[in-house]
Image: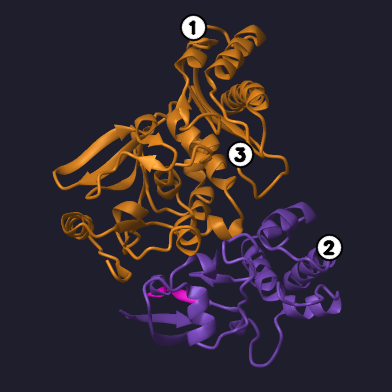
Amino acid sequence: MKVHVTTTINGDEIEFLCPPEQTLLDTLRDDLELTGTKEGCGTGDCGACSVLLNGRLVCACLMLGVEAEGQDIETIEGMSEAGELHVLQRKFLEHAALQCGICTPGFLIAAKALLEQEPDPDETTVRYWLAGNLCRCTGYDKIIRAVQDAAAELRG
Amino acid sequence: MQAFSYTAPDTVQGVLDELSAHAKSGERAQVLAGGTDMLVQLRGADRAPRAIVDIKKLAETNAVEIGADNVFVGACVPGALLSSNDQLKALFPGLVESVDLIGSAQIQGRASIGGNLCNASPAGDTIPALIANQGRCRIASPSGTRELAVEDFVVDVQKNVLAADEFLLGIDFPRPTTNTADAYLRFIPRTEMDIAVAGAGVSITVENGRCSAARVAIGAVARTVMLVPAAAAALVGTSLTETDLVAAQNAASDAAQPISDKRGTAEYRKKVVGVLLRRAIERAIQRLQESNS
């Protein structure tokens, strides 16, 4: 039996029906057509499905859709504002911090969560914070540099 | 049971009623906290339908109460909130570190002490720290709230004492005095995102240069996390010299009953768990020196 869920996603109030055992990730991708959030491992190891839940970084694959009831969720689709890329998105492009791009939305969401609580992270902090996001293309260096450069720009 | 169901009662009685109803009908029910273990299980080996009873809507399971004599940590408080609680970190630095060691920032956003304990893995990182700090499980049951020492809660690999109509509200601790410090250390082959090969938690109380109380628990070296009274006894009454620490180290190695698997051989784990304990004691001593200087 499907459960009726009311939640906020990227600032919009959303209602959906979902089976109790369905993950938030599948709800986002298959029912709400928010396919920017990716599925990598499906077991919380790769971080490709990172979203913000009430501002806190979580894996959408480790949450049920029904658990979104009454919560505030932010996905990659909510990151740019009024057609303008977020600084992190721009810096990922400038630093070529991606190749295939599957991990990128997760990295961007995770990096945003980091910079909101730590505006000036050193390299070690960035690397440890992003340890839950796997990238098999870049070797991470460009991602770390992009995040630190974005942090510098955000600090002004 | 033919299908999944989901409820998220907002009172303790509501959860107990749900669990009792399922226990009576014989339907399988599973209590959901942060879900970081449960959802992996749901998508892996154990896909059978069940009634999911979410306990995250309860005030009790989300509470952190720091009182004059007692500290309570709700079963569902996510690691990220525990790590950002400076008062809790000052009282139980080792316990908070044990939480923070689990998984990534994403996992910390959901994973809880209650879930880690109920999942009852031999390698659960918080469990040695909970035991070292004299944690007592606050369990909601149909006949009222009951208490149980954490070391008696886990009975075997992935098995805890909870009856089908009970659930864990959280953990109570005696508030540590300024003479008490804890520490937890684990060994993994890399620095992040792995499961303990061995772990050791300790809490020591030092008065006038002598250790007046100690608790030692070791993880990933037996079917359940073990309280090691012999290692604590090696410390109590001493002035915590190198010789005393080595005695505690040897007691922990002797108590360990590890298996050999891909993470390490039994022989290796026995040795490492002792070394970890010695270093954890050194860290706790250092904490006492820093906080009292």
From the viewer's perspective, is residue B218 above or below residue A5?
above
Q: Which residue is labeled 2 in the image?
A: A139
- The stretch in magenta equals A68-73
The amino acid type of the residue labelled 2 equals: Gly
- For label 1, the SS is loop
Residue A35, position in %: x, y? Answer: 60, 84
Q: Quadrant of the C terminus of chain A?
A: bottom right
Q: Which residue is labeled 1 in the image?
A: B237
Circle 1 marks a residue in which chain? B
Whole-Å distance between the Cαs marked 2 and 1? Answer: 53 Å
- The type of colouring in the image is by chain
Residue B93 lies left or right of residue B25; in this view the side is: right
Residue A87: image quadrant is bottom right
Contact flag, marks 2 and 1 (Cβ < 8 Å): no
The amino acid type of the residue labelled 1 equals: Gly
**Marks 1 and 3: which is nearer the front?**
3
- For label 2, the SS is loop
The amino acid type of the residue labelled 3 equals: Ala
Q: Which residue is labeled 3 in the image?
A: B196
What is the drawing colour of chain A? Answer: purple
Q: Report if residue A109 lies within the magenta region.
A: no
Q: Residues within 10 Å of mark 3 (few under 14, many from 20)?
A: many
Q: Report if residue A71 lies within the magenta region.
A: yes
Q: Are marks 2 and 3 on the same chain?
A: no
